[in-house]
Image (spheres, helix red, strand yellow):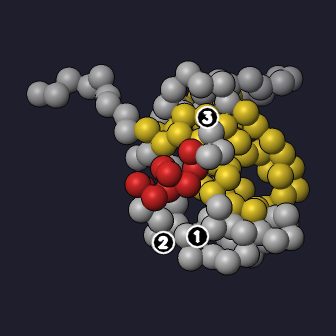
C-alpha cells in the first residue's frame, strides 16, 4: 500500500492508496513542478524541504551560510527521498506555490522571515496558516 501526501492523490493502475493531508500546500496559487537531481550524501530529505541549487546544478538543502549557490532557496521538495545511495535523478520539486510556513523543512541557518524574503523572488510564498479548528 502506498501513502500519498499532498494536494491530490492520482495513482495509476491498480494500487491500494491511502491519502493523508499534510498541510504543506497553503493556497490556491497554481503549483509549478520540475524534475531535478538531488545531490547524494544528504540522508533522507523529507517532503517540504527547502532546496537550493549548487554550482554543479544539483539540488541540496538550502543554507543561508552557503557560498556555492545553494544559499538561494529556489525549490520545495515534493516527496521524501533517500540520498544516501547516490544522486537521486528525477526528484520532483515545486518551483512556484503557496506553502504553510509551519510545515516546511528548513536549515537552522534560516529564520522564517529571511526565508520568506528569499523565496519570494522565485514565486514561493510562505504563509502563516490559520486553522478552522474549534479554539475552545
Mark 1 in CB contact with mark 3 (< 8 angstroms): no
Label 2, residues with CA under 10 Å away: few <14, some 14-19, many ≥20: some
Q: CA distance from mark 1 to mark 3?
A: 20 Å
Q: Quadrant of residue 118?
A: bottom right
Q: Is residue 120 above or below residue 41?
A: above
Q: Residues within 10 Å of mark 1 (few under 14, many from 20)?
A: many
Please state which of residues 123 and 57 is positioned toward the viewer in this rendering.
123
Residue for point 69% across, 67% down: 70
Residue sitting at 83 percent across and 24 percent down?
12
The mark found on residue 112 in the picture is none
View extreme (left): residue:
136
Q: Which residue is mark 2?
A: 109
Describe the element under mark 1 as helix, strand or loop: loop
Query: Circle 2 sits in a helix, a strand or a loop, which is it?
Result: loop
Q: Earlier in the sequence, mark 1 or mark 2?
A: 1
Query: Is residue 44 visible from the viewing direction of this image?
Result: no
Sequence-first disc among 2 and 3: 3
Disc with the residue nearer the chain's start (1 vs 3): 1
Q: Element type at marker 3? A: strand
Q: Quadrant of residue 44?
A: bottom right
Left or right position of 38 against 104: right
Whether tag 2 and tag 3 are in contact, CB under 8 A, the answer is no
Residue 83: image location, x then y, percent:
75, 66
* Residue located at (67% from left, 52% from top): 74
Q: Mark 1 = which residue?
A: 63
Residue labelled with disc 3: 97
Q: Verify CB contact (< 8 Å) between mark 1 and mark 2.
A: yes
Residue 6 visible? The answer is yes
Report whether 27 appears left or right of 42: left
- The image shows residue 38, relative to residue 66, as above or below, that is above
Q: Quadrant of the N terminus?
A: top right
How packed mark 3 is, by other alpha carbons closer than 10 Å (few <14, some 14-19, many 20 or more), is many
Amino acid at each position: 500500500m502506498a501513502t500519498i501526501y499532498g494536494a491530490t492523490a492520482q495513482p495509476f493502475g491498480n494500487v491500494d492508496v491511502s491519502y493523508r493531508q499534510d498541510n504543506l500546500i497553503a493556497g490556491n496559487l497554481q503549483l509549478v513542478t520540475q524534475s531535478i537531481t538531488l545531490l547524494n550524501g544528504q540522508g533522507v530529505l523529507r517532503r517540504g524541504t527547502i532546496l537550493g541549487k549548487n554550482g554543479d546544478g544539483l539540488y541540496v538543502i538550502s543554507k543561508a551560510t552557503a557560498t556555492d549557490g545553494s544559499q538561494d532557496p529556489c525549490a520545495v521538495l515534493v516527496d521524501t527521498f533517500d540520498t544516501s545511495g547516490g544522486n537521486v535523478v528525477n526528484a520532483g520539486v515545486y518551483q512556484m506555490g503557496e506553502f504553510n510556513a509551519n510545515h516546511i523543512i528548513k536549515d537552522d541557518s534560516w529564520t522564517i522571515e529571511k526565508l520568506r524574503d528569499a523565496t519570494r523572488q522565485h514565486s514561493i510564498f510562505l504563509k502563516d496558516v490559520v486553522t478552522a479548528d474549534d479554539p475552545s
